[in-house]
Amino acid sequence: MKIFVLLCLLFLGHSIPVTFKDQCKCSKFPSETTCLEQINCIWNTSICQDRSCSQYYNKDKCNAVSHCSWNISNCREFTKCTDYFMNDPFDCYKIGNQDLNQFCMPTENGNYCKDYELAPCGNFEDDCSGFQSQWNLCYWYKNTCNVVDIRYCDTQLNEELCFIFGEGLGCQWKDNKCQMITCSDYTTESTCILQRQNFIEDGPLLCMWDGTKCIEAKDVSHLDYSNCLVNSFYNYIWDSTKGVCVSCKDYTPPTSQTP
Ligand SMILES: *[C@@H]1O[C@H](CO)[C@@H](O)[C@H](O)[C@H]1NC(C)=O
Ligand SMILES: *[C@@H]1O[C@H](CO)[C@@H](O)[C@H](O)[C@H]1NC(C)=O
């Protein structure tokens, strides 16, 4: 009997994680309108396709795509850092190919970019800066050089770091430490959507409003046609034939549009 109760608790406690890799592919959007609502998709005759780098016409949108980089006036697949000339040298930090861990930085003189140079953290304030490995930032704090892992809320030493790196991770500065936002931290129905965990490694969890408070969602039955896609971190899509919110992995769009 005890085992049964435990199993039930485990089952009840199961929350819904959603991830970047399970987001709906462009091909899942059967109409031009829903296709074009997705910034990474483009409508081509009668199908919804992934936008290629050259089909982004805005610098920020271009650089936000992991493998695309903006060069002077157009967006292309990233090549190598030294191929880029920037009017604002700081823009070198915005290009690269995140999928291949390729990042760039400005050269000391001139506006060309170069490969990002990782350097071990030094012992003095002057050489305690930059990254010593992909996720490890050198950060001068309380008169010592600290190595800060930027992937987690609880490794951010102070409010400043919690704000800079924690925003994308879903961290908050609370009770004098940097900690993960949980569903129960949302106190209104309109903000009760996602509990963003460690964005780099784990996916966020869905939250739902139970009438009085925000709790972790056990499934997606609280979502409807208007919010299924957006509120599920684009992991679920509204199946209008069945009238339910379904996982993109399990969804087959209708083959032809009936007008
Ligand atoms: C449209 O799709 C066809 C077939 O996949 C492809 O050959 C063509 O390049 C696409 N056009 C654009 C503008 O992406
Ligand atoms: C960026 O544009 C400049 C000027 O058109 C060109 O010389 C350079 O090859 C381009 N770099 C890339 C990576 O396309």
Image (cartoon, rainbow, N blue to C red):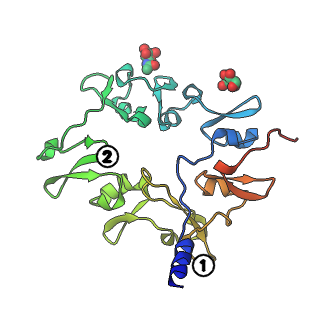
Q: For the view shown, which residue lies furthest in the bottom direction?
A: 1
Q: Does residue 193 appear to the left or right of 110 in the view shown?
A: right
The quarter of the rendered structure image containing the N terminus is: bottom right
User: Residue shown at 49%/38% (left/top)?
Assistant: 64
How far apart marks 2 and 1 lie (CA) works out to 39 Å
**Numbered label attached to residue 212:** 1
User: Residue shown at 31%/56% (left/top)?
Assistant: 160
Task: Give residue 85's position: percent from left, percent from top.
Answer: 38, 21
In the image, is residue 259 above or below residue 210?
A: above
Ranked by sequence position, the earlier of labels 2 and 1 is 2
Foreground pick, 198 / 5: 5
The quarter of the rendered structure image containing the C terminus is: top right
**Badge 2 is on which residue?**
135
At label 2, the amino acid type is Trp
In the image, is residue 183 above or below residue 86?
A: below
**Numbered label attached to residue 89:** none
Near mark 2 (Cα within 10 A), the count class, few <14, some 14-19 or many ≥20, is: few
Near mark 1 (Cα within 10 A), the count class, few <14, some 14-19 or many ≥20, is: few
Quarter of the image holding residue 104?
Answer: top left
Task: Give residue 144's position: percent from left, percent from top.
Answer: 14, 54
Q: Does residue 133 appear to the left or right of 25 in the view shown?
A: left
User: Residue shown at 53%/75% (left/top)?
Assistant: 7
